[in-house]
Image (cartoon, rainbow, N blue to C red):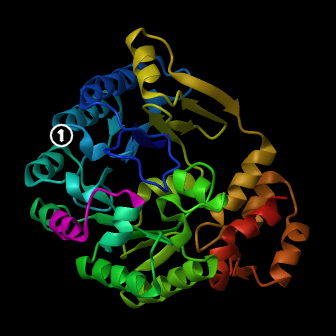
Amino acid sequence: MNLGVYIQVPFCQTKCTYCNFHTGVVAREKYGPYADAVCREIAELAVGGDLFALRDASVDTVYFGGGTPSLLEPSALADILAALHRNFGCAKVVESAESLEVTLEADPETITPEKAQTWRAAGFNRISLGVQSFDDHELQAAGRMHRHADIFAAARILRGAGFRNISVDLIAGLAHQTRASWEESVARLLEIHPEHISIYLLEIDEGSRLGTESLAGGSRYSAAAIPSDDAMAESYESACARLAAAGYEHYEISNWGLPGFRSRHNLKYWRREPYIGLGAGAHSFDGARRWWNVHDSAKYVACIEIGASPREMIEPVTAQQALDEELFLGLRQLEGIDLARVEKKYGVSLQARIAGLREQGLLEMAGPNLRLAPAHLTVSNEVFVELLG
């Protein structure tokens, strides 16, 4: 059994206005004890893995997410990777398709030549850059710390350190974004020519300061300057065309990769493959159950220090939940799902559930696969709600 391992680092330099994650700004003195706690959680799982057949598992992807994992000392990140190698069967890191994929999320302004070289030496071979925009006005309004010059500097540093697998994130719909500024961001992105690209539509919900303000009709955090839904959709569709022309494969609603550079770790989520989450708020899945750790980082560290389980909840996945996940996670992939395989696996017929969506042109068959119609990817959430309703 191959596993993905996700390491949650819930610390940031500042809270972005659009962020709805369980992250926070804490004193740097908290970073070291947190990294130590993650190392201890790794060791304790390996010897007493009551929820996972850990001894029979081999880790083939590792993902440090957050938050801003690049804030941790490079030595602390190296210690966590070393703990994984000591306690789990990890693939040897070589520059090939069979290598262990080790990703570190990093903000551009946190990257230095010394850090990048240490990361590479420790075993990181993929960097995910939280760029979001190349427009300084948009970045400032969103509460980001970096500016467009920092992005280019970070890319040069990473290439100089030997990284040959870089992913860059953009957000369509940031406050003050115009069609012109969006097209400029995409152009600058293509100048950097990363191996992987993620493009997300701005989420407007009560989980962020910007979302709360926008829903209330207020103007703080530049909420009144958020583009319309139609403008966001147009930006996304324009990016789809430009990335395709540049040779990127669109393999998931929000993700593109050059040939051979899809995110192997994130594919585990969409394919419902097993993964372990370590750290505060991290989620795990073994095919039959999901569980997650407490979200508060201080409480997480305290639990580890006294030898108590940091798990907040463990819940079985029912057959209906598994089917629903198979549908909405599988349909996020542009190739879709093998409809006959899913029907056979769960002993159901889905024809009645998909008939109306097919008639509307929102779902379509591509050979044996059911997939989202490529022209309607921007309304995928609405499709999923109707499909699962």
Q: Nearer the viewer, residue 25 or 66?
A: 25
Judge whether 114 appears above or below 50 on screen. below
Foreground: 97 or 350?
350
Q: Residue at x 26, y 61 (%)?
A: 96
Q: Which residues are magenta?
A: 142-155
Q: Amino acid at mark 1?
A: Pro
Q: Is residue 192 left or right of residue 340?
A: left
Q: Where in the figure is residue 374, as x and y percent of width and height?
A: 63, 83
Q: Residue at x 34, y 22 (%)?
A: 37
Residue drawn 59% across the image and 25% down it: 312
| Residue identified by numbered label 1 | 74
Disc 1: CA contacts within 10 A as few (<14), some (14-19) or many (>=20): some
Q: Residue at x 67, y 81 (%)?
A: 376
Q: Nearer the viewer, residue 119 or 203?
A: 203
Kind of element beneath mark 1? helix
* Residue 139 at x, y percent in the picture: 35, 65
Check residue 94 for magenta coloring: no
